[in-house]
Image: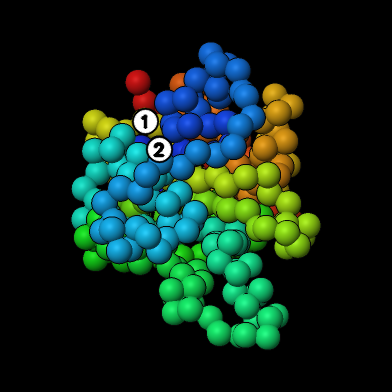
Amino acid sequence: MSSPSIYLDGVGLLGPGLSGWKHTCDVLAGRTPYVAAPTVLPAVEKLPPAERRRVGIPVKLSIAIGLEAARHAGADLVSLATVFSSTEADCDNTHAILEALASDDRAISPTRFHNSVHNAPSGYWGIATGSMQPSTSLNAYDATFAAGLLEAATQACSNGKPCMLLAYDTVFPEPLQRLRQFPDAMGVALVLNPRQTPAALALLKLTLSDASATRMPQDNLERLRERIPVARSLPMLSLLAQGHNGSVVLEYLDKLRLAVEVCSIS
């Protein structure tokens, strides 16, 4: 079984030691050494002040990477369908709700409640961009990036219109951090297009595979790949950053992986 080929028009990325796609390209291509550092989120763009005050890291992160990818692609935000893919969603908010439920006063604020749903970032994206296009929110544990890529590529090819993947992970406070020990927040956004346009960076061909997942040759980037689910994207992004053609295998299910052939477009 395979999904149709899809063009990649734009990338947005923020993560520990990775401040935007241009900087990440330099790191993945070996032009700049990777230096681990806390993820820095820019000021939230486009949201009205009232909504801006209420949002947490998932919304700030997804809006930042989504806007960067859309700018690179020259995409029309209003007409862009989206797939939001996150392993744990809003970890800070989940922690706060669980603390409240474990206390004598079990009241939960309406803002915390509506931010607790898995598709909250999708809703805020619609407010920020004015988009009323279809949006899907999913989770597949450590396979969340590959699942999101498959979903977004399938939707774009089925509908004949571009679709953006916004995949992100955030960090739990203690004590849940002991169960899911992500070092920091990270997000990757991809604008996928069923048709080739002047913005196209590469053609991606997706197939299912039983081969082992591709590892990063640099020890520090391999540790990042292993520890943050969305960082499973790094082998594919490395080919793109280097402008190389090639194939990588991304972690997906226990006995099934996602093979991605990257054909760069000059």
Taking the spot 53% from the left edge, 13% from the top edge, the residue there is 31
Quadrant of the snapshot with the C terminus = top left
Residue type, mark 2 in image: Val
Along the line of sight, the residue nearer the viewer: 21 or 210: 21
Mark 1 highlights which residue? 201
Image-quadrant location for residue 253: bottom right
Residue toward you, 180 or 200: 180
Q: Quadrant of residue 71?
A: top left
Point 46% across, 42% down: residue: 41
Query: What residue is shown at x 46% (from left), y 38% (from top)?
Result: 13
Image height of 54 relative to 230, above or below: below
Q: State whether residue 126 appears in this view.
A: no
Q: Is residue 197 visible?
A: yes
Q: Nearer the viewer, mark 1 or mark 2?
A: 2
Residue 244 against residue 255 in the figure, above or below: above
* Percent position of residue 50, x then y: 30, 63
Find disc 2 in the rendering and name its residue: 11
- Measured in 3D between alpha carbons, the distance from the residue under mark 1 to the one under mark 2, in whole angstroms, is 9 Å
Q: Are marks 1 and 2 in contact (CB under 8 Å)?
A: yes
| Residue 69, x across and y down, in percent | 35, 40
